[in-house]
Amino acid sequence: MFDNDAPLSATLSPLIKHFGGNFQRALDDVSDAELRFVQLSAAQPGMRPRELDGRARKDLIAALHRSGLMISGVDLFVPQRDWLDNQKIDRVVASVLASIAFAADIGRVPLCLSFPYRSIAKDVLDSVLTAADSHGVTLAIHGESDPQEFDLWLECHDENFIRAAIDPATVLATDHDLNAMTAGLAGRLTVARLDDYAERSVTDTGGRCNVGDGSLDVTSYRVALSLATRLRHIVVELRDLDNASHALRQAKARWDSSNPFSG
């Protein structure tokens, strides 16, 4: 057992929203929290691939570097139903292909996706996989809804550029065993989220919550992640949280104090 020491990253979009759309303040906040990576969203206004030409992409990277930050990856979470909607699928595919090209341009970072892998049309999947392969971009697929089916799907798509991602809040919400699922994906896991989940009885609304305020056992999760030898980043997921800046610091503190491999 070992600690693979994958670095923490932070989802940038919720921080930009928290600071009233101020991109630089969001970057400064991540830097002040002593993280060195950010996770971009391809759905973030002003940062959508179609809105950024080659010069703008270089400017984005330069702005991050000036703040001492690098990009861990890109998120594009399209509603599952849209992948199966004949009226929307052309736009979905165009958005995914543009996001793959974007991920390639900014350093060939992983693109995190979630799609109905059991029922997606073959031609749609083929176009996405071909684009990722040709651009040298790793696809980090979230498949938390059905661990056994996801394992089978991954076995059928045993390509170096097809990897797994995991989101604890999503797993905990479905009552699956997070640590067992994490360990089971160890050989394919490239991106792991760090977030928490609380039932409605614990919080006013239920759902994703600050790390430490829900049912996540951070230490056990960290032990399970230690088996993932290809893990590149652990992304602090700040979506849906009331105070993204505070949530980032709380997550980092809980993560730092949970290390069973130190001392």
Image (spheres, helix red, strand yellow):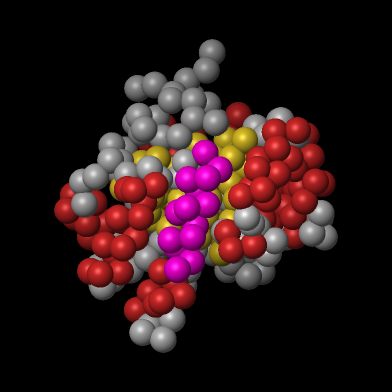
Question: Which x, y percent locates residue 27?
Answer: 75, 43
Give, as a single range, the part of the protein colored magenta.
Answer: 94-107
Question: Which x, y percent locates residue 45?
Answer: 68, 64
Answer with left or right where residue 248 lies relative to residue 168. right
Quick check: can you spot residue 183? no
Quadrant the N terminus occupies: top left
* Residue pictured at 41% horizontal, 86% vertical: 87
Quick check: can you spot residue 54? yes
Question: Which x, y percent locates residue 236?
Answer: 59, 45
Answer with left or right where residue 9 lies relative to residue 127. right
Location of residue 248 (image quadrant) = top right
So how many labels did they put on this image? Answer: 0
Classify 257 as above or below 151: above
Question: Which x, y percent locates residue 6?
Answer: 49, 30
* Residue pictured at 38% horizontal, 43% vertical: 136
* Residue pictured at 26% horizontal, 57% vertical: 150
How would you classify the magenta stretch by its main secondary structure?
helix
Classify 100 as above or below 252: below
Q: Residue furthest bottom?
A: 87
176 is within the stretch colored magenta: no
Of residue 234 and residue 176, the one placed in the foreground of this image is: 234
Of residue 58 and residue 28, the one placed in the foreground of this image is: 58
Location of residue 252 (image quadrant) = top right
Quadrant the C terminus occupies: top right
Answer with left or right where residue 4 lies relative to residue 241. left
Of residue 204 and residue 58, the one placed in the foreground of this image is: 58
Of residue 183 and residue 74, the one placed in the foreground of this image is: 74
Classify 134 as above or below 198: above
102 is within the stretch colored magenta: yes
